Image (tube, rainbow, N blue to C red):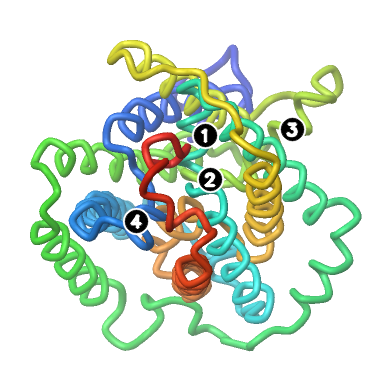
Amino acid sequence: MFESFGFESLTPVQASLYLALALGVAFGVLAEITRFCLRRALVSADQSERRAAGGVWLMALTVALIGTQAGVSAGLINFDAHRFLASDLPVLAIVLGGLAFGAGMVLTRGCASRLAVLTGSGNLRAGFVLVLFAIAAHATLKGVLAPLSAALASVTLPLGSFTSLAALPGGALPYTGGLALTFFALALRSGASWRNLALAVLIGLIVPAAWLGTGYVLYDEFDPIVAESLSLTAPATATLFWAIASTSIAPGFGVGIVGGILAGAAVSALAFKRFAWVSFESPAQTGRYTLGAILMGVGGVLAGGCTLGAGLSGIPTLGFSAFLALAAIIAGAKIAGRVLNESGSGSVAQPSTQALQPAE
């Protein structure tokens, strides 16, 4: 399919870089305006803000789900060999990784995507977390923590051919419809502004656009690339590796996504006069964010993705692994939020400095 679109001067990897840059810029702008973040929907101190943030996130998920499954139904997107539909579910790694990631994003007051957006907006705390997140993820994927990751991933639950909701009786349509209607209804009742809900629709469209672009438009049987969509764990490791070894490897989709989000967020923050340099306030705060970044990096790899990769992009595949990962992330965030609230020393219980925190 790649050759039929006339990309004679580009390889699939090069074309995926430009596609990711465009999609990343779009996400960066939209996420900066809407303050798109699952963490805010789970543990924000203000209930109305929590519901509104959840509504924006669910509206984006609704559109991502419908758009992705429409592409699957049309034969343009295929997840048969995707890791979200693996026949052996690495249940222990996903659960532990999800719990760690959820706790980490509470400690750092933002999921990975929100921290990337804030980095582009001038927040040095968020940038520090993003770099540590990438280092920890790379160490878990290919470095000193890789043996631990492999050991946890070896504990699996055999699913056979029943790897997704689409494999259950009735096929994908009733489950897609039921989930989409539920998410849509909750989004409309959330109290989120119509502007943010409309922008969330555009965020949701980025997910199937990425699946379609990498899995269909840029597919080349002689030089295949992996089908990808919005995520940050793997792209962060790819960006880190490219940054320190750019003369030996070519940038691809992951580098484009990270670069695009940073650029898009910066453009939006500057245009709306929200760009501001922000740094750490105390050694204790630095330590908390450091721990959170490491938990997110390790957890994102073990769980198979972050709130973007396993959530916004993963759920639309209907794969059971994505549902399990997102559930574990939510549980980890809820548990961490409760512990920090009860201790009175965490990131949740700081109303007096809330406006200064990087994910708020």
Work out whether mark 4 precedes mark 3 in sequence or the reverse, and give the earlier one.
4
The residue nearer to you, when weighing 294 against 20, is 294
Looking at the image, do the residues carrying marks 4 and 1 touch, with CB atoms under 8 Å apart? no
Judged by depth in the image, the label closer to the viewer, 4 or 3, is 4
Q: Which residue is mark 3?
A: 240
The three-letter code of the residue at mark 1 reads Ala
Separation of marks 4 and 1 at Cα, in angstroms: 19 Å
Above or below 155: residue 240: above
Judged by depth in the image, the label closer to the viewer, 1 or 3, is 1
Above or below 355: residue 84: below
Q: Residue at x 64, y 88 (%)?
A: 157
Mark 2: secondary structure: helix
Mark 1: secondary structure: helix
Above or below 170: residue 300: above
Mark 4: secondary structure: loop
Q: Position of residue 256 (x, y in %)?
A: 56, 27
Q: Residue at x 19, y 74 (%)?
A: 178
Q: Position of residue 47 (x, y in %)?
A: 22, 60
The tag on residue 44 is 4
The three-letter code of the residue at mark 4 reads Ser
Disc 4 crowd rating (10 Å Cα; few below 14, some 14-19, many 20+) is many
Q: Quadrant of residue 189?
A: bottom left
Q: Position of residue 233 (x, y in %)?
A: 62, 48
Looking at the image, do the residues carrying marks 2 and 1 touch, with CB atoms under 8 Å apart? yes
The residue nearer to you, when weighing 50 against 114, is 50
The tag on residue 112 is 2
Q: Which residue is mark 1?
A: 116
Separation of marks 2 and 1 at Cα, in angstroms: 6 Å
The three-letter code of the residue at mark 3 reads Leu
